[in-house]
Amino acid sequence: MSNTKALTPVLECKNVNISYYTRAGEIPAVIDFNLTLMPGESIGIVGESGCGKSTVALAIMNYMGKNGRVKSGQILFNGRDLQQMNDEELRRIRGSQISMVYQEPMASLNPSMKIGEQLIEVPLYHENVSEAEASQRAKEMLAAVRLPDPQRIMDAYPHQISGGQQQRVVIAMALLSKPALLLLDEPTTALDVTVEAGIVQLIKDISKQFGTSMIYISHNLGLILETCDRITVMYSGEAVESGSVQTVFNEMRHPYTRGLFASIPLPGTNKHSRPLVPIRGQLPLPQHRPQGCYFGPRCDFFQEGRCANKAGVHMQPVPNEDRHDVRCVRFEDIDWASHRPVGLSGEQADIGKVVLEVNHMKKYYSLKDASLMALIKGKKVQYVKANEDINLIAHEAETVAIVGESGCGKSTFAKVLMGLEEATAGEVKLNNVDISKLPVEQRKAQMVSLLQMVFQNPFDTLNPSHTVGSQIARVIKKFGIEQDPEKINQRVMELLDLVKLPRDFAKRRPRQLSGGQKQRIGIARAFAGRPSLVVADEPVSALDVSVQAAVTGLLTDIQRNLKTTLLFISHDLSVVRYVSDRIVVMYLGRIMEQGTTDEIFNPPYHPYTEALLSAIPIADTSVKKRHIVLEGELPSPVNPPSGCPFQTRCPRKIGAICEAQMPPLQQTDTGHAILCHIPLSELSKVEQVIQMDAA
Amino acid sequence: MIVLAGKRLLAMLLIMLVVSFILFSLFESDKMAVAGKVLGAYSSLEQRELWLTQNGYDAPFLERYLQWVGGALHGDFGNSLQYKVPVSELLADRLKNTGILTLVFFLIMIPLSLTLGVLAGMKEGSWLDRVISVVAVLTTSIPEFVTATFLTGVFVYSWHLLPGTSSMTGGFSWKELILPVMVLVIYDFGYVTRMTRASMAEVMTSQYIRTAVLKGLPYKRVIMRHALRNALIAPFTVIVLQLNWLLSGLVVVEVFFAYKGFGYLLVDAALFGDIYVIEACVLVAVFVAVFSQFISDIGYTLLNPRIRFS
Amino acid sequence: MSSSVKLEDEKAPVKREAGLKLFFKRLALIRESPVGMVGAALILFWVVMAVLAPVLPLYDPNAIMAPFQKIGAAAPDGGTFWLGTDHKGRDILSRIIWGAQKVLIWATFATFVAYVVGMLMGVLAGYKGGWADEIVSFIANIFLSFPFIILCIIIVATLGASGWTVVVAVTFASAPQIMRIVRGLVLDLKTRDYIFAAQTRGETPWYIMLVELLPNARGPLIVDACLRLGYTVVAIATLGFLGLGLPPPDPDWGLMLKEAVPLGAFAGHTMYLPAAALASLILGFNLLADGLREISLRD
């Protein structure tokens, strides 16, 4: 990596400016972008949504749509300017020398063509090969990306295979002509955590095996650390820092990079003593970028005279370091050692009485089987066991996290709690009243107000047709907290104060709010009736990291002050570790393990928990992690495996007993419970998954 | 797949049954009115009662309905009050004429609108797209009888190029078919063109087309193999369902040009109060509509592998 | 509460707008679509004509004066037949304007009734699902299986020709289509989190349907309503043309055409003028719908 000057870079971006031209005028999307990618090197481009990272990838491909254009600068591929090429030259390079892997594998494959045909097109149109040879190569490549039974995949349509398999197909397609450069645009964002781990492992192996240069675009710093040699951090259309992964992760110099790291829940952060520090303010719209440093208004080190100068701020090399550049005029003055940003912290509230108690709760859905076979056999109804034998307890002021991948039943559980679905069997007791058979329409307003929810998607958590204030007011009125309009209004204002939004937001409509602000309103709405239990279903997963930190901080702070019980549903174990006191791990409708956060993160582990933990990408160079990649696909809840639900993918499977029998629930005195055939004593001997260096 | 077809077929039968029942109740539940229609407004009460008895109208309503359905299934709809011939004969002849008109219309409209739609949708926002789109809106905005008026004005009254009526009294004549087909095509091609364009434009912005382009495939291959197949699924269903819409157009055009087809017969019967003809025509029309819906549903599943295999 | 999380500030001006004002403001967006502007102008022209019909200096539309007068011919009473007269000697300008009033009133009313029925059916089917959906959808399918013209003919044949018949026919034909559109929109909208939020606070189904769901479906529905008004105008005129529409002697554009076409060879204006009037009004609705759709896709 150090002495590469003699070689030609595979890709070189020189002072690239990219703009979109809309009715509103020119919108600069990428400004003054430079990048040098050497053969065999991999560069990660990281940034929050709207920072221009995907635009860079599409510009490299010269696929900008009719509105976008590279306004100035050069993008050189092996020394040749891609902008100067004609259509035929471009066509020859695309797919053969530069290829791309996309964020949504399902949408990237043609739904009405068999996968085989989509694959063999690549060699057929780029090399002079026969169809038989192309087909043979496609099969070999499918095997190389570790897809079982390549022939079956070749004959399948995209929708007939799983998301993880689709992404492997897309990767195989990209590699078929042995490209010199591979662009990966958020290749794992749409996938489940354990599937993501498999793809990441594959990408790492590819770069070793094929020597392909890569550009890996992601919002996740942990993934960049796992896959790349170098990193470029982007903010509002500009690269603000670039350098080797080691340097940037350990000695970052730009305040934005600092802020980004401070806002992600790394091991070692803690909501009570070492809280996350969000970046204040929000990303400026391209039309409203400030003069000088774009990060200025959000930066703690902003100096009027120097940072807001008209000439703008340029990338400059960090002295005495190799290929480490920073776009900050003050990077040499800032004394990071004495900088101690403060997050939202507070004492752990006393865990009080039991608020929620779930005993042997089951929820089955019946599924009508319309196939001819079912008609003949007279077996018309199948059951999806969405929740099976759920037991858990949550206390006052406690945060209990429910973790699992898609199809694990965590959302069904939330629906049963909220009264949108009735439990098939078992008890769900809220403050000692069984609500498992009580749909929400039959619950009294007071009971409904005690149990509220924060939703996942900020973009549709609020009704776009009504003002923010009227939506909060409706809740207050509905719960009978206040009836007098004056008092309701007063309460709306108090709630806006609670979530730290200006009072005049009451008059705004949801589309005038950013994602984080909408999520705050969602929180205000949930806490309007002073609930004793709030269910938060992936409340931050759709937000950018810096906003995630702010919303997580707010949620835990309010909860702490109001002594609310929080049920935090998530797939993201790093956030879960940060916010929760206890964790419940679910897989295919069953609880595989539950215990305190410490118990979950330390042995004994359930083998599934172990795999989940190893799948968390961690953006910390000092952390060592064991890598466990699960084989096979996530089974469908309609057709769960016999015996232990996890047996089809379990790396620690002990034999026939796993397939034949449901494992016993092994419990310690502290309440740590694991559903597994392997004795606890043996599971305790397992090495830690995540180890911190001299922490 | 077979299950789906079976289900649809069953639904189709059910709808036909309900429709026929509604129809029968509307027109024949009042026996006296029927007799009045048949024997004329000045017939006496005794005459009417006698006729009702002779023609089996004394049976209970449900029994009469079942008999009527049975007859209809054998093609027996009774005699036309206006023309005094069996309705089935009248209908067969008229359906043949309308069939010719429809066939010629589809042969011209389908290739025309698919080509225009694909061309427009391929490059959204291009001048070609704009021209095609504007023409399509203009022509679909003008109802058939207005187009027919203008065309008649120009081709018949001003230029004396074409005959103004298409009654085909001197045997079949292609010349007499030109104006009716032209009117139908002008009014209907716009809709299918717009659908095709929208579908094509949507496909062209899809991520799998991006994949195909960035795979380095030639543009022709991207369009022919990747885009068209997906883009033509929606227009297919629209074209089949067109049959239903087309009927209104056929009625108007046939009346306008005095073309002796099914639509003309229907309006004629409606104005005369020829209830047996109306019943037969409505049954046929509804059957065509329901059946085209069935074809369209089945075709959609066949064309769409995502549905076909799940 | 410590406060390192600072208030998030946004520059977007805060405006409080009343519903109606907001509606007109959105409507004003049509200025950004030239196509929509042309459409709006055409409709506005006919609406103004229709409204002013009683106060404009027009002849009685049914008064029989001199037949087949040319455009701009002098009238016996010293006035002018600006657009000539028809075969019975009635003033064409007056008949066109009064005809516009009639067609606009009946079309708007019929579309409105069809919308009320169709929206209720659609929201019910989409939101409730299950049996309600199956029953409503089956009823809709029955009516959809009648081609529109057939439905009209049956209804006219049983009820006789009148404006009310048109309303009934349009309702039967359009309501199922509106129901399908609304049902589709509702099926999409009801998976949104704000609907779950409303459910989890125990709102009644009717509150959710009418307050939470319907307002969010208005975008596509406004476009559809506009198109549908156009169709309804076509339908009324078509019925008139076939002799099944609003009964004479009151002016009806379709009927005017029917009577004029056979005589078109020597009195072209009696046929071209109502045809042009009809085409322009329908074009107006279609262009406006196009413009509205274009604008709604932009945001």
Image (cartoon, rainbow, N blue to C red):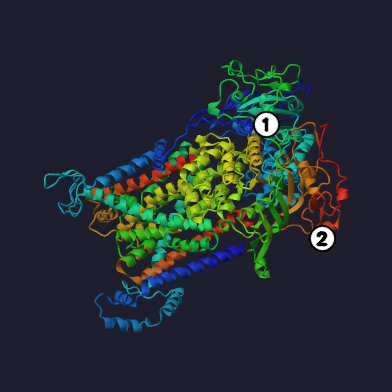
Quadrant position of residue B280: bottom left
Q: Amino acid at mark 2?
A: Ala
Which residue is disc 1 drawn over? Answer: A343
Q: Quadrant of the N terminus of chain C?
A: top right
Q: Residues within 10 Å of mark 1 (few under 14, many from 20)?
A: many
The number of callouts visible is 2
For residue A89, say whether it is visible: no
The reply, left or right, for residue A135 in relation to residue A497 is: right
For residue A302, say whether it is visible: yes
Q: What is the secondary structure assignment of the residue under circle 2?
A: helix
Which labelled disc corresponds to residue B73?
Answer: none
Q: Residue furthest left?
A: C77
Q: Dot 2 falls on which chain?
A: A
Which of the marked residues, 1 or 2, is nearer the chain's N terminus? 1
Q: Amino acid at mark 1?
A: Gly
Residue A250, compared with residue C228, is above or below; it is: above
The reply to the same-chain question for discs 1 and 2 is yes
Q: Dot 1 falls on which chain?
A: A
Residue A669, compared with residue B276, is above or below; it is: above
Which residue is disc 2 drawn over? Answer: A660
Q: Position of residue B173 (x, y in %)?
A: 36, 59
- Mark 1 or mark 2, whichever is nearer to me: 1
Q: Are marks 1 and 2 in contact (CB under 8 Å)?
A: no
Q: Residues within 10 Å of mark 2 (few under 14, many from 20)?
A: few
In the foreground, A487 or A567: A487
The reply, left or right, for residue A575 in relation to residue B161 is: right
Residue C239, compared with residue C47, is above or below; it is: below
Q: Position of residue A312 (x, y in %)?
A: 59, 19
Quadrant position of residue A376: bottom right
